[in-house]
Amino acid sequence: MTSYKLIIIGCSLGGLAAIKTLLAGIEDDCTVPIIFIQHREQGAEVSMDNLLTNMMQRFIRRSVEEAEDKMPLKQNCIYLAPADYHLLVERDCLSLSADEPVTYARPSIDVAFDSAARTYGSGVIGVVLTGASSDGADGAASIENRGGLVIIQDPVTSEKDTLPNAAVASTKAPIIMPLGEIGPYISTLVREGGARRASRATG
């Protein structure tokens, strides 16, 4: 039975709306740390500020913070990757890197997913949402290869299906489901310690 340590979510185009739908479905008793990686274009800070405000109002029991270098990972907290830095997951903390963009992105979903997989292995739930590039597909494969679980938004329900389709192609046994089902499914997985993992058909 798996004990999940981290939920990490990646998206780009359409992600602000998608993440709010996903988080609305995660129950309060799911206190595993959540990391949110979204491609942030220049000038997008106002949208992220609005997202922070909206999430704090809606998820009052869950702390929301923009990640800082060496920030400890805490239960019941959501961390947002800052603009123009790669976010890396270390044991019990986060770190930031100003290394060159990967797949034209900084923060890169692939970089964050791969570091989470290397640090927590089978304790990671990786979630791939709507997106306009393939960044995140290789990271999803890394999570799967190290024993973690990959959940992919059904491309049909995505505002932009490039990323979900790329993630489906790069993984062997992902869970694929409509956006509205992902949050409740994660809550059940965490509550049951992964016991339901093999019971949900893909596709």
Image: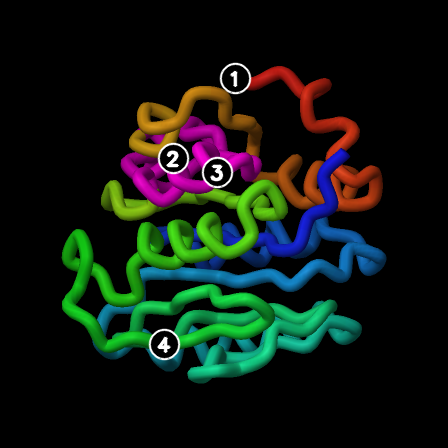
Q: Left or right: 175 with respect to 195?
A: left
- Residue at image coords 56%, 36%: 149
Q: Left or right: 202 with respect to 130?
A: right
Question: Which amino acid does the dot numbered 2 rest on?
Answer: Ala
Q: Is residue 162 magenta?
A: yes
Give the image location of residue 79, x and y in percent. Answer: 54, 71
Q: Mark 1 points at which residue?
A: 203
Question: Which amino acid does the dot numbered 1 rest on?
Answer: Gly
> What is the spatial separation of the Cα atoms under label 1 and label 2, in whole angstroms?
17 Å
> What is the spatial separation of the Cα atoms under label 1 and label 4, in whole angstroms?
35 Å
Q: Left or right: 93 with respect to 12?
A: right
Find out whether the residues at labels 2 and 3 contact each other: C-beta distance under 8 Å. no
Question: Which amino acid does the dot numbered 3 rest on?
Answer: Arg
Tally the numbered discs: 4
Q: Name the residue under label 3.
A: 146
Q: Mark 2 points at which residue?
A: 141
| Quarter of the image where the N terminus is located | top right
Earlier sequence position, callout 1 versus callout 2: 2
Q: Name the residue under label 4.
A: 96
- Residue at image coords 71%, 37%: 185
Q: Left or right: 117 with respect to 12?
A: right
Give the image location of residue 124, x and y in percent. Answer: 58, 47
Earlier sequence position, callout 1 versus callout 4: 4
Q: Give the range drawn in magenta.
A: 137-165
